[in-house]
Image (cartoon, grey):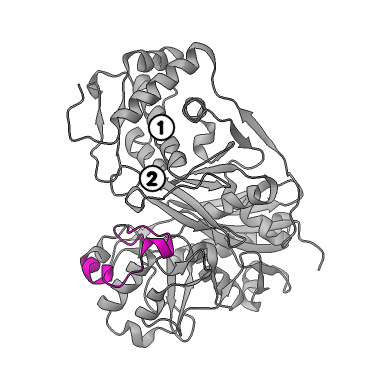
Amino acid sequence: MSQPRHIAVVDIGKTNAKVALVDLGRRAEIAETRTPNDVRCVPPYPHYDTDGLWAFILASLKDLHAQHRVDALTVTTHGASAALLDAEGNLATPVLDYEFVGPDAQAAAYDAIRPDFALTGAPRLPMGLNLGAQIHWLLQTQPGLRARLARIVTYPQYWVGRLTGEWVCETTSLGCHTDLWEPRNGRFSALVAQLGLLDVMAPVRRANQCIGPVLPEICAATGLAPDTPVFCGIHDSNASLYPHVLDQTPPFSVLSTGTWVIAMAMGGAEVALDPARDTLINVNARGQPVPSARFMGGREYEILSGGTHVDPAPDDIAAVLAREILLLPSIVPESGPFQGRTARWSHPEGELTPGQRSAAVSLYLACMAATCLDMIGARGPTLTEGPFARNGLFLDMLAAITGRPVLLPGGSATGTSIGAALLALGDMPRGAGQGAATHPPPTGARGIDLQRYAALWTARAPDQKEPIP
């Protein structure tokens, strides 16, 4: 068939799921449907509602195809997840919610067998954030699972398998702090053999490889043409990175904002990554190692805002900068560059106006993001995507503290669906797309005030054990 134009992207984030239709010619979303990504807190453990998501995906594909025509499909999802399948291709056990604390109960036994950070680029993370720890815990605690287990697939490829009947793994998800992959060597780590999984890991494919056409039953349920191709799919942060891998010349970095804020450096300075600060090595769609760091910025914003956004007025921002009102890390202390720190305000929180509090929160998030960029040796412009790219104060502080331009890519409000859709173009770079707007570092008194504030925040953030004078 000719090059596809309308790509349906199944985009499953940690908080919400959507099916977006991307016009590749315009690099823009032209339609989408959304639903919450609910966690079912019922036995045997908290898990994703895959049946509910599947019903949503089929209904969305039917509607989008009827309205616009779907030429091809692909999938992008959050990381730290996989599907364990039985011989019939059904789930051998539900897909575990990676925020479930259950795997921590097996931490000592797991730590005795997990590979070193130097090989995997995967820091030791709590809960189920290391996929290897999830699988280890499941095999130890779920009766009969090992006997039922026939195939393990990474999470985006689980949905690809349901669409095509072909079960595969893919390197961007394997390289997402799983402990199962060696990014620099491009192979499974020794942990796979330690867990006895060499025979059950699905074959590894490239993110932009066509896995097959949709199954006949999918055509019947959605109206899609029988020859509609399905591409392998990609981890969501790497989907955000992919357009820039195609379009930009290193050095540059990408800041993908959502539930997680992920900083990724291409062509940056050589630095020693610190696994205790949530740095890691991702693997991009071309199989290249990418130094990365992250924190749960979107989750922190939700906690701090209580679901209500307040735009700070100029007077609010001026007051926060002049009075040096600091919010210090961490709101979610289980991950990020300041793990184990207890968040606190430098001034009594109750004395702040809503606008002042909102300004301090934006400055806090920008300082956290800049810390992540510094830890991975980021150089060149910072391409910023997602919800925080619409926050002017966040962008001002990010540009001021790094001293480098912030670029705002054109097109979609989020880069995950666009990046995933570009997989359908194959291996050839496609030029500069829609380009990017520049958000330059603030100058004059505003720039000086932001830099002074950032220096103070940076000095006080690392250690919350002593009172702030």
**Where residue 167 sits: x, y (%)?**
55, 77
Front one among 58 and 437: 437
Residue at mark 2: 296
Q: In which quarter of the image is residue 50?
A: bottom left
Front one among 235 and 338: 338
Q: Which residue is drawn at 40% across and 77% down?
A: 192
Q: Residue at x 52, y 54 (%)?
A: 290
Magenta stretch bounds: 105-129
Q: Residue 367 carries which label?
A: 1
Above-or-below relation of 331 to 56: above
Could you tell whether 362 is left or right of 249 in the image? Answer: left
- How dense is the environment of label 1, judged by Cα within 10 Å: few (below 14), some, or many (20 and up)? many
**Where residue 61 sits: x, y (%)?**
62, 61
**Where residue 326 sits: x, y (%)?**
31, 25
Q: Is tag 1's residue or tag 2's residue first in the polypeptide sequence?
A: 2
Is label 2 in a helix, a strand or a loop?
Answer: loop
Q: Point out the image quarter for the C terminus.
A: top left
Q: Point out the image quarter for the N terminus.
A: bottom right
Front one among 188 and 260: 188
